[in-house]
Image (cartoon, helix red, strand yellow):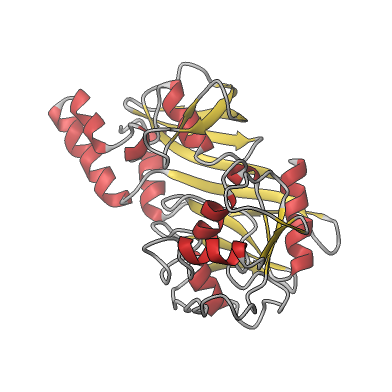
Amino acid sequence: VKIAVSSSDELIRLDLFLSQRLVQFSRTNIQKMISNQSIKVNGEWTKKNSALNYGDIIEIDLTNKNNLEKTSLEKWKYPLDVLYKDKDFAIINKPRGVIVHPAKGNYNQTLVNILLDTFEQDFESSVDPLRPGIVHRLDKDTTGVMIIPFSEYSHWKIAEQFQNRTIQKEYIAITWGLWDKNEGIIENVLNRNKKNPIKFEVSNTGKNALSEFKLVKAGRYLSAVKFFPKTGRTHQIRVHCKESGYPIFGDDLYNGGIKKSKEYAKEIQLQLNNYYSMIEGFCLHAHSIEFNHPSTNKRVQFKIDPDKNFQTIYQDILDEKI
């Protein structure tokens, strides 16, 4: 098995990175695999605490008899919305509330498990058996367009475009507050929060994050905004909204939860609470993606509209009902 290190995983130590990816193994077992020389980084043996760099290639020998037996990932039958499919890739609408790949505590109800069931006959044998079809990620509660490559070749052709930033993405967000600019650029440096590693924050050290935005409509209490991320940092748009003073509606992690409704009159609180219960998460949707087809190299674009509840809130903003 080969795994490429993405920009969002840079500087994580090897054993921690693999414990997040190889969820069938305990961290102790992974450390044993490293000491047994079952794992190479860029073709060389390394130590468990080695820091990874963007673009590193990790090779894992799962046939070494000195390692504990691996358990296979289970399929999960789930009604997946498939917008497009050919021999190279599929375009799907990632459902809300589903994490992309298995992690500690959730091995069997992830997008990977859904993909194993939906596209079992489409994946070539060369794809990563632990993360089939995963070339980019969306957060658990983010819905929308995702590319699912079926072969190692398609994976690398698409991954190369992400690395070179030639893939164009558009997101739609519903945020708290009334934006004071119609359009602009948000750029800063993001890093993990030391007290809460799940969370990201603006920092003096870390990775550059750049998003362009365009205000669609400022309602009375909520706004509809389009984002065009030029980098692909974890939680990038969510942090950019929070740091701008307009957190994404429903985003508890970044100060956008329903508690914020207490700042408004009671009749408005009721309406906001109703929206919150409709969404069951936060309001961020990957609306479109544009890239070069891995086989033909022709430019292709795919769009997926948000779900009905998201669209209801969005339309109420346009109609100045909220």
In percent of the image, x 20 and y 31: which residue is there? 268
Relative to residue 154, is residue 256 drawn left or right?
left
Say which quadrant the C terminus sits in: top left
Q: Nearer the viewer, residue 81 or 60?
A: 60
Residue 270 position (above or below residue 130)? above
* Camera sees residue 166: no
Instruction: Looking at this view, name the residue that lies furthest to the bottom.
Output: 121
Q: Quadrant of residue 167?
A: top right
Query: Residue 73 appears at what percent x and percent y?
Result: 50, 76
In percent of the image, x 25 and y 49: which residue is there? 277
Say which quadrant the N terminus sits in: bottom right
Query: Residue 61 appears at what percent x and percent y?
Result: 67, 72
Relative to residue 112, is residue 124 drawn left or right?
right
Q: Quadrant of residue 62?
A: bottom right
Query: Residue 76 appears at what percent x and percent y?
Result: 44, 76
Instruction: Looking at this view, name the residue that lies furthest to the left.
Output: 266
Numbered disc total:
0
In percent of the image, x 52 and y 80: which residue is there? 69
Q: Nearer the viewer, residue 20 or 320?
A: 20
Residue 134 position (above or below residue 311)? below
In percent of the image, x 37 and y 27: which residue is there? 219
Relative to residue 153, is residue 23 drawn left or right?
left
* Camera sees residue 199: yes
Residue 148 position (above or below residue 217)? below
Query: Residue 212 appears at what percent x and percent y?
Result: 61, 29
Q: Quadrant of residue 178?
A: top left
